[in-house]
Amino acid sequence: MDLDLRNFSLHLDENQRTVRRLSDMKGFYADQEAVAQILKESDPVIYEVYACESEEEGPGNLSYALTVINPGDVGGEYYMTKGHFHHKPSAELYLGLEGEGILLLQDREGNTRRIPLLPGRVSYVPANYAHRSINTGRSQLRFLAIYQSDSGHDYGTIEKEGFRERILVQKN
Ligand code: S6P
Ligand code: ZN
């Protein structure tokens, strides 16, 4: 993946792509009737991740990944990532590239915080916080994440316990 911020061109490598469809994350959404209804017709791509492992492996090295979240909602709950803790407490930087969204943080006690994910803005994920990204806009949300290569990803805790906050489409 090459990233040219001056021209805002992104060259994505299909070999590094992970696709998350609704069927991969059914239980993450609150409205199970809406999930079932959508899946009767189609299985939309919620987000994609293009991950780059570092050239050097082991403690002290960095990895980075580009995430693309499509616009949309499931029963009024915006498209979002699964969210995870890092096994090894380690911070992470997010750089917003396109679109608008929210970075939802939650500590081990369940306290939450919302941070804007916007183009050109660097958002900080402190160590020991679960983090989930939510696309609250009408276009794709794209951001680059930079993290320690040996962070490790714990998805099980969030899959089981969820986040205490849900980001819902505002009804006018
Ligand atoms: C990795 C970093 C991101 C996420 C990506 C997808 O530490 O936080 O690259 O992996 O945004 O989210 P998730 O929760 O499916 O890994
Ligand atoms: Zn992370």
Image (cartoon, helix red, strand yellow):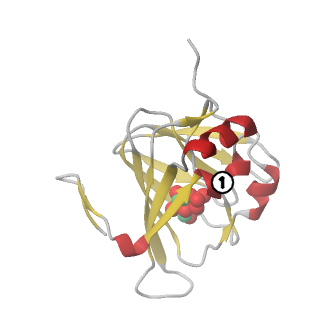
Is residue 14 shown left or right of residue 59?
left
Residue 75 in view of the camera = yes
Q: Is residue 51 above or below residue 101?
A: below
Residue 92 in view of the camera = no
Q: Is residue 43 above or below residue 57?
A: above
Pinpoint residue 106: horizontal percent, then vertical percent.
Answer: 71, 47
Residue 88: name its quadrant: bottom right
The crowd level at tag 1 (other Cα within 10 Å; few <14, some 14-19, many 20+) is some
Residue type for callout 1: Met
| Residue drawn at point x = 61 percent, y = 73 percent | 151
| Residue drawn at point x = 40 percent, y = 85 percent | 55
Residue under circle 1? 25
Is residue 99 shown left or right of residue 88?
left
Identify the element where label 1 is drawn: loop
For the C terminus, which image quadrant? top right
Pinpoint residue 144: horizontal percent, then vertical percent.
Answer: 41, 58
